[in-house]
Amino acid sequence: MIRNGIDCIDNYTHLFAGKKLGLITSPTGLTAELESTIRVLHEKFELAALFSPEHGVRGDRQAGALVDDYIDPFTGVPVYSLYRGDSKRLTPEMLDAVDMVVYDIQDVGVRYYTFIYTMLYAMEDCAKAGKPFVVLDRINPLDGATVEGNVLLPEYRSFVGNYSLCVRYGLTAGEVATMVNAETGLNAQLSVVRCEGWEREMLFPETGRIWVPPSLGVPRFETALLYSGTCLFEGTNVSEGRGTTSPFEIVGAPFVRAEELAEEMNRKELPGVRFRPVYFKPTFSKHEGELCAGVQLHVTDFRALRPLETGVRLMYELKRRHEQFAFLPPVRENGRPFIDLLGGDRAYREENDEEALLERFREESRAFSERKQAYHLY
């Protein structure tokens, strides 16, 4: 059986015994039997605080919605927000309430997915405060071997990309923490409670575990697999399917010619995917209440699919076919366009040759694959 860190916690009681614990978690913080990590730590040790990332510890906040402090009604433990308007950091006052900070959230293995930056910020804050930091590790659902995309450039760091990772990086959260701790010289008191039985080449459906949506926008494994490519459309005026039942599986806009686009994308014979013309009205987010046309991406082969390359080719095809296609302006004055933050550089706006772009990405992926091996725990 594949076991995540929380399933192996009885082998690590020496780490937690006698300490006041602060837990960063979400609805994916669960054992194999779907028991909450909150409950496990509350019953076995002294759980002194909960720290809430984006979406909330109970998953009741939409993407981007700020989180407030409150008292958890099930444990009586105070919940402190790590997704505030002015900061996403642990404060000295929060850290004074605990002896150790524990992290347990299911990652999806994609650079734009913000939970790993909540983890890295917390590790930095703990290092400065001299507090131990523990990652209850979880398998990477997209496997721990496949790497795709470019490496983020330092000047494009943000909360959707805050370290020099490839888009699909092939590491667990514990391995990312280990890499950052070593490469930055942070010297955090880092411990990783390791998974058991997982092999790096495994995709999630091969693990026998139950899929629990890591956020409201990632309801299925197929969504997580496609996300590394289709999330790029968040930086454009094309809907990435938010506000539908198939976010990140549907891409479209009011100006798209669906049948033509689907036909051309299928003509490319991209591995592991087929395109179907679709029409939809988002209930929120971009083009709310408007009839949109576009394509739905149907995964035909989990292993053959290269989602980042698929997303790039779809974006370039939309640009070629529709003069209304546009990248969104910066959210903040003098800020960078969101596509640059997602992309980790300016390439999507400035490079007109998609083949040259993808070849550069492949070279960076190969180099990152070699670099990351030093931090493999499995």
Image (cartoon, rainbow, N blue to C red):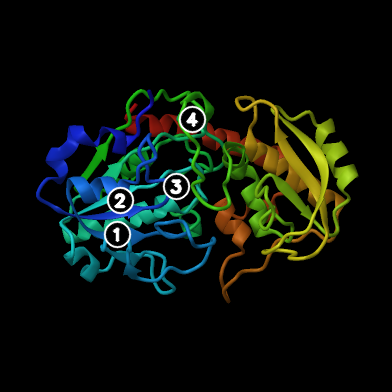
Residue at the (24%, 37%) spot, across then down: 9
Badge 1 element:
strand
Q: Mark 2 or mark 4: which is in front?
A: 2
Give amino acid for label 4.
Asp
For badge 1, the amino acid type reads Leu
Q: Earlier in the sequence, mark 3 or mark 2?
A: 2
Q: Give yes or no for contact between labels 2 and 1 (Cβ–Cβ under 8 Å).
A: yes
- Mark 1 vs mark 4, foreground winner is 1
What is the spatial separation of the Cα atoms under label 2 and label 1, in whole angstroms? 8 Å
Asked if residue 12 is positioned above or below residue 120 in the image, the reply reads above
Q: Quadrant of the N terminus?
A: top left
Q: Residues within 10 Å of mark 1 (few under 14, many from 20)?
A: many
Q: Earlier in the sequence, mark 2 or mark 1?
A: 2
Q: Circle 1 sits on which residue?
A: 50
Using the numbered discs, state the Cα–Cα distance from disc 2 to disc 4 in whole angstroms. 26 Å
Residue at x 24%, y 67% (from the top left corner) = 94
User: Mark 3 against mark 1, which lies toward the viewer?
Assistant: 1
The nearer-to-camera label among 3 and 2 is 2
Quadrant of the snapshot with the C terminus: top left
